[in-house]
Amino acid sequence: MALQSTAREPVIQVTGLKKQYRLGQIGGGTLTADLQSWWARKRGKEDPNVKIGTDTRLFGQTFMALNGVDLTVYKGEALGIIGRNGAGKSTLLKLLSRITAPTEGEIRLKGRIASMLEVGTGFNNEMTGRENIYMNGTILGMTRAEVDAKLDQIIEFSECGDFIDTPVKRYSSGMFVKLAFAVAAHLDSEIMVMDEVLAVGDMKFQQKCLGKMSDVAGQEGRTVLYVSHNMSTIRQLCTRCIVLNQGKVIFDGNVEDAIAIYMDTTDVNVTHYDLRDSGRLTQNSGVRFFLEELNFPGKESSVFRTTEPVRVELKWHVSEPFSGVNLKFNLHFRDSSPVGITHPVDLGPCEPGRTYTTTVTFDPALLGEGQYHFFVDVFEKTLASSVCLDKPNQEFAFEVVNTDLTIPEWSAGWGRIHFPPLAIESRQEL
């Protein structure tokens, strides 16, 4: 249960915050080419350095990742930040963490920030876990004696004691998350900023982290900003929630109201996803195996009847040979509550440097009517373990419409799976 904040002292004040990115060509490679392109544009002529067939109208276009955000966060609050992919959540956290600068607006912070925006943020791969703890403490302005006092707690919480003097480049993504969270939670920062990173850890450790963040906000009076697509963790941790949509705050207030508004922004009209610029949940995702696109082929919307198979087309590229690549979907209802995981399918052998297209199907007949989304998980199955190859941080939305009139209606509280009728094995009169 989340603890309520009693203090009303502002620690983060954001006014008119905007972040603009320029799309299109950045540079021609040489000063001469850049000058030629600039002079051609000034005269309204065709750019001599643009490849034939390129849409030159894209040059100079801009993308507003954040477009006028006003926000005040108080001491001891646990603030949830939710919204669809591309809404501006990660951009907001990067601005607050001073990783990038705003285009317009003002940010006022009272206290030090410990940020965990992706697995391994602020860590040096060549240094050991112990050395990274001291380095992070130094960055926060702590003395060696202050870090010494926290060291045993950090190591114990991280569950990485046996590997603490091993270079972190040898850590698994789960170990990375455990140590990074332990450092962020225990070093003396007034503000903690977390961006979806707990999705990499195991369920037991996630609950341990959520409990620690609740203690940090409620008992220690520190402030937590938490971005997640998992609404159950938002409910568990946060006392207040904002919803971002197209770079603007469209709601700020009660957690349940925020979740309801977020669910209404689910877009089931998208049938094509370009994953080349999508973030990945782990450092090694998309390195040897890379998902480029996902489509619902032959569909104008991702709405499926219960009698219609869900067809998903994936385009992928490999940089080394594989013989045991498996694909599965992690299925969630629109409020992010888990529904299930599809049985893994082997994509077959593949050769390095080649691009492939695979179409898979699954049957929605047992799903209750409503909106769902899934995440794609590609992994290599070995005799010892499973190794993640690619896992885009992108949810793929679809809707199931019931066309079987024999299925009765019932409350959503009964779950999302429609089991088939019980079969009578025998009947006799006594």
Image (tube, rainbow, N blue to C red):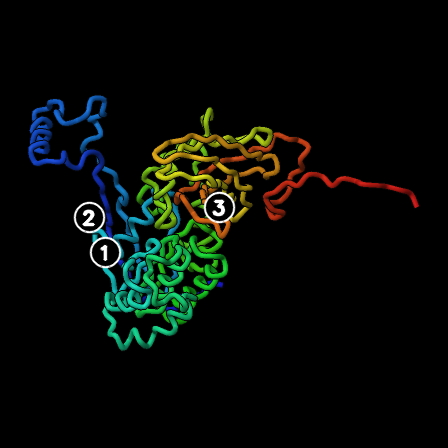
| Distance from the alpha carbon under mark 3 to that under mark 1 | 40 Å
Image position, residue 104 (x, y; %):
19, 48
Query: Is label 3 in a helix, a strand or a loop?
Result: strand
Q: Which mark is first along the chain, 2 or 1?
A: 1
Query: Is label 2 in a helix, a strand or a loop?
Result: strand
Q: Is residue 147 left or right of residue 231?
A: left
Q: Which mark is first along the chain, 3 or 2?
A: 2
- Front residue of this view, candidates 313 and 221: 313
Kindly indicate whether the residue at mark 3 contacts the one at mark 2 (C-beta within 8 angstroms).
no
Q: Residue at x 37, y 37 (%)?
A: 318
Image position, residue 110 (x, y; %):
25, 65
Q: Is residue 69 left or right of residue 297?
A: left
Provide the residue designation for mark 1: 98
- Front residue of this view, candidates 123 and 184: 123
Q: Is residue 75 visible?
A: no
Q: Is residue 152 visible?
A: yes
Q: Which mark is first along the chain, 1 or 3?
A: 1
Name the residue type under label 1: Arg
Q: Residue at x 45, y 44 (%)?
A: 379
Q: Residue at x 29, y 59 (%)?
A: 123
Between marks 1 and 2 in the image, the one whose residue lies nearer the viewer: 1
Provide the residue designation for mark 3: 381
Provide the residue designation for mark 2: 104
Kindly indicate whether the residue at mark 2 contacts the one at mark 1 (C-beta within 8 angstroms).
no
Q: Where 13 sits versus 156, above or below?
A: above
